[in-house]
Image: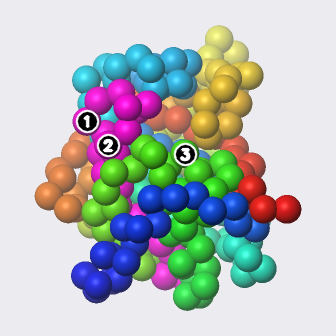
């Protein structure tokens, strides 16, 4: 994506406008916290275990639309750099949008994940201070059993695995939370997990991971 297009992405985070959109699918991530990230329970009020939060996120859209344009089957990757508590904002975010997306779908996904589209992600207009990049990429997401993976060329090679509970056939899960992603969050741990982009070189192997079913929507009815 050219520099002019990236500049155009910045105003998206300023105000949230209720829009007709919806996404159902799965979000999973790997962050710099030791296992387990405190944000799920503290809702970002507790400091990250390292004092800052660095993460990659993967969003598999199983069903979705934006203003009548289908988003179903598309993948999205995010790189997130937060200097302190999640709730204090100043997030710096790069977005990697599935290169199979139409122009309308691409623009819609950027509006959703910048918060401009309102609804579930509208809070991002206050939390995200800078969109450092937005690109069309081949975004590969793998969901197999207890394992999850996000692969975006050499930029993100992320793999996490669910943490087994007392019943080894069931992962450790936090239920009935008020977390922004969704109420039920599966605990995971980074396996091979590296980020190399925008001057960041991160390795989240052995660090905290999360897996959550999502059911998000805009505010326009």
- In the rendered image, which residue does mark 1 sit on? 83
The residue carrying pointer 1 sits among few (fewer than 14), some (14 to 19) or many (20 or more) residues within 10 Å by Cα, namely some
Residue drawn at (75%, 56%), measured in percent from left and top?
Answer: 219
Which residue in the rendered view is the most extreme toward the right? Answer: 221
**Residue 76 seen from this side:** yes
Segment colored magenta: 81-100
User: Which mark is first along the chain, 3 or 1?
Assistant: 1
Q: Please tell me the numbered disc located at residue 123.
A: 3
Q: Position of residue 56 (x, y in %)?
A: 39, 49
Label number found at residue 156: none
Q: CA distance from mark 1 to mark 3?
A: 18 Å
Residue 109 lies left or right of residue 84; in this view the side is right
Which element is circle 1 on? Answer: loop
* Residue 103 drawn at (x, y percent): 55, 88
* Quadrant hosting residue 84: top left
Q: N-terminal of the two: label 2 or label 3?
A: 2
Q: Are marks 2 and 1 in contact (CB under 8 Å)?
A: yes
Residue with the mark numbered 2: 90
Q: Earlier in the sequence, mark 2 or mark 1?
A: 1
């Amino acid at each position: 994506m050219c520099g002019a297009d990236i500049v155009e992405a910045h105003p998206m985070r300023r105000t949230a406008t209720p829009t007709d959109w919806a996404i159902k699918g799965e979000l999973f991530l790997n962050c710099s916290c030791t296992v387990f990230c405190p944000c799920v329970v503290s809702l970002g009020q507790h400091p990250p275990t390292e004092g800052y939060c660095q993460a990659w996120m993967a969003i598999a859209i199983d069903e979705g639309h934006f203003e009548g344009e289908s988003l179903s089957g598309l993948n999205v990757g995010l790189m997130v750099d937060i200097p302190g508590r999640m709730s204090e904002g100043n997030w710096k975010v790069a977005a990697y949008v599935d290169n199979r997306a139409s122009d309308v779908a691409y623009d819609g996904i950027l509006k959703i994940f910048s918060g401009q589209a309102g609804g579930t992600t509208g809070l991002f207009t206050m939390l995200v201070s800078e969109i450092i990049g937005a690109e069309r990429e081949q975004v590969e997401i793998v969901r197999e059993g207890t394992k999850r993976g996000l692969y975006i060329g050499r930029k993100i090679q992320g793999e996490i695995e669910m943490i087994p509970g007392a019943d080894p056939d069931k992962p450790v899960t936090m239920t009935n939370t008020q977390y922004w992603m969704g109420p039920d969050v599966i605990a995971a741990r980074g396996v091979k997990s590296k980020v190399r982009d925008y001057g960041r070189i991160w390795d989240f192997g052995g660090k905290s991971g999360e897996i959550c079913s999502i059911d998000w929507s805009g505010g326009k009815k």
